[in-house]
Amino acid sequence: MLKTANVNGVELHYVDQGKGAPIVFVHGGLADYREFGPITEALPNDYRTVRYSRRFSFPNTNPPPGPSHNLLLDVDDLAGLIEKLDLGPVHVVGASYGAFTALMLALRRPDLVRSVVAAEPPLLHWLPDIDGGREAHEHFDKVVLRPSAAAFAAGDPHGALRVAVEYFAGPDGMEQIPAEFRNMLIANLEDWRAITTANQIFPAVSRAEMGAMSRPVLMISGGNTAAVHRLVDPELERVLGNAERIVVEDGSHDMCSEQPAVCAKAIHDFIVRNAR
């Protein structure tokens, strides 16, 4: 059953299920609390799982995003929700934008975090210092970020969605993805607007700052993911030093949705080994 919590002046919808060690799931861009439903169903029953929708995602009806929006606002929302529900410290599982959010929570509020599972966080500002990264970053900016922002400015949100889907899923991506997944993307266009039209959506966390991580981290990568993530993930693994990392061989950037049983087992095994 969907519940609501008022946090930092916004309303967040969430699902709170089960009893046991608490796990909070943070979805990626163009998604909402439903993204992690298959994974929570595949986990053992001895967890308390909380899946919530970030401030601009379905079915929240908060004021629209502005150019000053930044991922750190989502970090503050996540901290506020954990405190509101008296959950902490928790295991935090994030995908893409949500993975970056989870990592930043662990850096800024380690008192609220037991461990982090991060599936391909977009630390794109590291790319220019990685061999081949500058070209990948420029390509991503040219074919995804700038066209998406231009489509929103032109009043064409569905054009912005098509740009994103074709980058991650191929030229016929909109026609190939399952209808249920496509409908979730459409329901979360305001989240994509927030990400692509912000002046600076991602905080410029340094390698030294990330390397000071004090909580156990499991990284999950897709074997068939986009170029930017193929470059960033090994660099993040190097910087973290003691992080664990698994590669879902046939997985794309959406490996958590594509192979929930594989990812659920990895999450469970990691928690048992490190931070139960």
Image: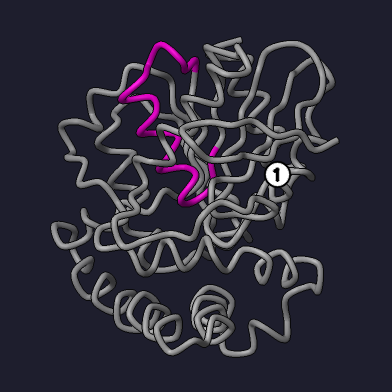
Rendering coords of residue 169 (x, y %): 59, 76
Secondary structure beneath dot 1 equals: helix
Front-most of residues 149 and 253? 149
Rendering coords of residue 180 (x, y %): 81, 67
Give the residue at x 50% y 76%. 164
Q: Amino acid at mark 1?
A: Phe
Give the residue at x 49% y 15%. 114
Side (left or right) of 247 relative to 13: left
Against 263, residue 169 (above or below) is below
Q: Residues within 10 Å of mark 1 (few under 14, many from 20)?
A: many
Against 130, residue 103 (above or below) is above
The answer to whether residue 272 is magenta is no
Pointer 1: what residue? Answer: 36
The stretch of residues the image draws in magenta is 94-114
Give the residue at x 58% y 14%. 273
Against 232, residue 42 (above or below) is above
Rendering coords of residue 101 (x, y %): 42, 39
